[in-house]
Image (tube, rainbow, N blue to C red):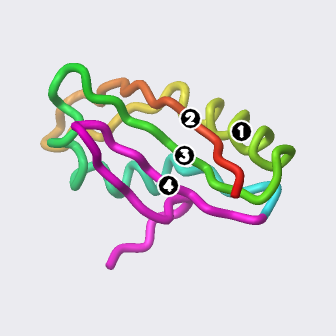
């Protein structure tokens, strides 16, 4: 098992990747460091055209969901993926979603 800051789990469906964060806190640490740490494991899944990288925050109320979606959208808007082997980092589009349970 790997512990990645700001990330609780990853799901894949129909070629899309869903990175999950569940919290009851109204503020949370950025998922950027966790996504960078996980990138070598998910890099090969995100290469084909048409696949989407999604970040989903799950929380208990609409106010927290809205605040965290705004924060994570800002944190991830300029996400550049580690390329490895001295190659240039590559920008990756990340869609941010919120869910209330």
Which image quadrant is residue 71 in? top right
Q: Position of residue 28 (x, y in %)?
A: 71, 57
Please tell me the numbered disc located at residue 96: 2
How far apart marks 2 and 3 lie (CA) works out to 6 Å
Q: Residue at x 36, y 24 (%)?
A: 91
Furthest residue in direction top, as rendered: 49
Foreground disc of the pair 1, 2: 2
Which residue is denoted by mark 1 in the rendering? 71
Which image quadrant is residue 37 in? bottom left
Q: Which residues are magenta?
A: 1-24
Which residue is denoted by mark 4 in the rendering? 20
How far apart marks 2 and 4 lie (CA) works out to 10 Å
Residues at badges 2 and 3 in contact (C-beta under 8 Å)?
Answer: yes
Q: Secondary structure at mark 4?
A: strand
Q: Position of residue 32 (x, y in %)?
A: 51, 46
Foreground disc of the pair 1, 4: 4
């Amino acid at each position: 098992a790997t512990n990645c800051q700001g990330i609780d789990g990853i799901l894949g469906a129909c070629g899309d990747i869903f990175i999950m964060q569940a919290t009851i806190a109204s503020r949370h640490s950025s998922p950027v460091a966790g996504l960078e740490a996980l990138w070598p494991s998910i890099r090969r899944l995100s290469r084909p055209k048409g696949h989407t990288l999604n970040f989903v925050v799950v929380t208990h109320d609409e106010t927290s969901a809205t605040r965290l979606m705004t924060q994570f959208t800002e944190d991830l808007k300029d996400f550049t993926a580690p390329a490895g082997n001295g190659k240039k980092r590559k920008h990756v589009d990340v869609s941010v979603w919120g869910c209330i349970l």
